[in-house]
Image (cartoon, rainbow, N blue to C red):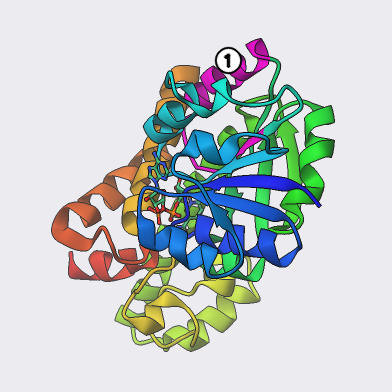
Amino acid sequence: MAKIAFIGLGNMGGPMAANLIKAGHEVCVFDLVAEMVKALTDQGASSAGTASEAAVGKDFIISMLPAGKHVESVYLADDGILNVLDKNAVVIDSSTIDAATTQKVAAKATELGVKMMDCPVSGGVAAAKAGTLAFMCGGTEATFAEVKPILEAMGKNIFHAGDNGAGQIAKMCNNMLLSIHMIGTAEALQLGADNGLDPKVLSEIMLSSSGRNWSLEVYNPYPGVMENAPASNNYQPGFMVNLMCKDLGLAMEAADASDSSTPLGALAQSLYKAHAAEGNGKMDFSSILQWLKSK
Ligand code: NAD
């Protein structure tokens, strides 16, 4: 079993660290918020006073932080993690951040002889708790072979997307597409309802027709159609509008940098931004249906 430091114990990191403990790994945790740390020490983790202290002497360092600036400071600051690691340590950053920051941290890690992989996830809090996340990994084949058994304690589908940064690119492409088919699904269901159709019946028809997609299949945005979907629970997240805005921002930055044409991604971003600007940032992203309905 491995010695693991886990940094960032929020909605996602907390249950991911708990699954590593359940799998029998020795886990040392750090978060800026004491109650997050306590939730994990209650489940058998040890804790440290700083991220770097947690990382000393560990085989794997896993981080699950809000954004690129947090990842950069935790690893690259003068007292950051990269300066305290053993040469055989492996860094796994599972935060969703821009590929450029990931590549910057990976370049410094390589310079210091440390291996790093970007391993962002898809699946949300429910999958983090159930240990069924999808991981999209960027780094060398050899590092992928080392991290895979560790990720298997937290996830079900584990992909090697390519070199450093490729995991983040895969994640932003996926979430851009998710935003587009969620908006499309919401529009179609509301159009049907406005024209007298029962959204449940319309959902069944489209699920057996060419409109079938993930939003319709497991995350129906129309209230009451799917018992366990956020739409049937006042759009409690789930996956927040604010996080979708963040991911679309990353996708649009990447599209600019690569001169890619993403008109639907840009439109989805403007709709989600407008939704968030009306005070709905903390609602589940499927609430875009309510916003469309209100226009
Ligand atoms: P969160 O805000 O719940 O948790 C982040 C945690 O990081 C907090 O506990 C915070 O205290 C801690 N933190 C911040 N700066 C820190 C630092 N310098 N040192 C130590 N701890 C620090 O966020 P989350 O929902 O767990 O998301 C984490 C990442 O996962 C984000 O990048 C997000 O985009 C991504 N993600 C989230 C979901 C989701 O459904 N919530 C799904 C997929 C991916």
Q: Residue at x 48, y 38 (%)?
A: 51
Q: Is residue 10 magenta?
A: no
Q: Residues within 10 Å of mark 1 (few under 14, many from 20)?
A: some
Above/below status of 214 relative to 100 = below
Question: In this view, which residue lies farthest toward the left?
Answer: 278
Label 1 CB-ligand 1 distance < 8 A = no
In this picture, residue 235 sits left or right of residue 215 = left
* Foreground pick, 173 / 77: 77
Q: Position of residue 133 (x, y in %)?
A: 65, 59
Q: Residue at x 61, y 66 (%)?
A: 44
44 sits left or right of 265 in the view: right
- Which quadrant would residue 212 be assigned to in this image? bottom right
Between 199 and 156, the one lying in front of the other is: 156
Left or right of residue 278: residue 264: right
- Tell me which amino acid carries mark 1: Lys
Q: Is residue 234 visible?
A: yes
In front of the other: 78 or 287 = 78
Q: Which residue is mark 1?
A: 108
Q: Quadrant of the C terminus?
A: bottom left
Tell me the magenta residue range: 91-112
Return the x and y of residue 240 as percentages of the image width and height. 36, 60
